[in-house]
Amino acid sequence: MPPIKAGLIGLPLGKSLSPRLFSILAGLCGREIEYSLWECGTAKFHEAVAKARAEGWSGFNVTLPDKQLLAGALADKRDRAAGIAGSANCARFTPEGLEARNTDAAAMAAAMLDRGMDLTGKKAAVYGSGGSAATSAYVLASAGAAEVIFYARDPLRAGAAIGRLSAAFPAAVFSVAPFGPPDGAAAVVNATPIGMYEEGHLPVEPANDQICVDWPYSPGGTFFTRRAKELGAHVIDGMELLVRQAVLSLFLWGGCRESEIGDLIREGRKLLREKTGG
């Protein structure tokens, strides 16, 4: 069976654990996986995608800054989450063209479902204005949130996603607020680089029983997730989201069976934390 060739495209990638994670997954599922890191800014993103296809990649993952570019005109086909959020983090090459998927959305939704988290009629806060922020808003609205507020340092960028989200979820209210403390949110999501590629802290003091989701990851946890756990919040950390979306990506590329997904996520999380001290 030929190896699966894939990789991560984005900038910066210096703290990425994806190659280590896919090495773990290769051992768990008994497949050879060649997973590369390609640092690439927006100006050369199309060129990188063409090169990946030419080199026989099954597909690729995308991180900052091009999740929205992948979900846009570059894709020949996209899933519902990618279309509504305007963001995709995974792609595969097919005979019909490039298929974009938002496995980030599926990962966050599954993590919430596994914990029985119910946001029906509640308010949620999303920190950020890019693709991960829009993806988070999509998942929160899908989970029943009545109101989703983007706390954004770039309000215009956050506002661009609100039209698509409002059309898809007419019962929910989406808005943008200045980057500051959330007001009565049952769920708080960090979809900024703070905690991984950016120093500082969110203007958030987590609360007991609050749902706290953190897309950045760091061995041992970010300040946000450590503080949230100390105060009794329900935490979904970036390491878990990383593993979940990676396994879903691997499935998309034909590297595992659907029946193996749950075990790969469980064992992948365990082994990655052991190897990173996380």
Image (spheres, helix red, strand yellow):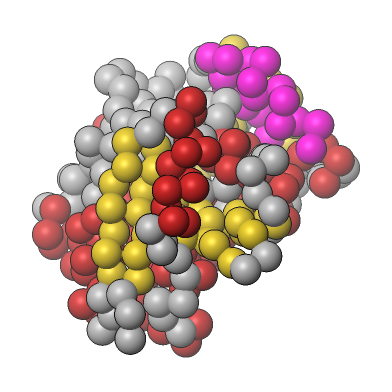
Task: Give whichever of 189, 182 is nearer the camera.
Answer: 189
Residue 7 lies in the magenta-colored region:
no
Tell me the magenta residue range. Answer: 148-164
Residue nearest the observer in this picture, 151 or 82: 82
User: Taking 105 as reference, is 12 left or right?
Assistant: left
Where in the figure is residue 158, as x and y percent of width and height?
Answer: 65, 24
250 vs 167, left or right, is: left
Q: Is residue 152 above or below residue 253?
A: above
Q: Report whether residue 260 is seen.
A: yes
Residue at (71% x, 22% y) in the render = 159
In the picture, residue 130 is in which quadrant? Answer: top right
Q: Residue at x 64, y 43 (%)?
A: 74
- Residue 100, how many percent across, how many down? 60, 54
Q: Is residue 22 above or below residue 78?
A: below
Q: Position of residue 46 (x, y in %)?
A: 52, 38
Judging depth in this view, the residue of 223 and 207 nearest the camera is 223
Count of numbered marks? 0
Q: Give the residue displayed 41% in from the left and 62% down from the top.
A: 57
Q: How far across and down, in percent of the image, does residue 8 sit?
A: 36, 48
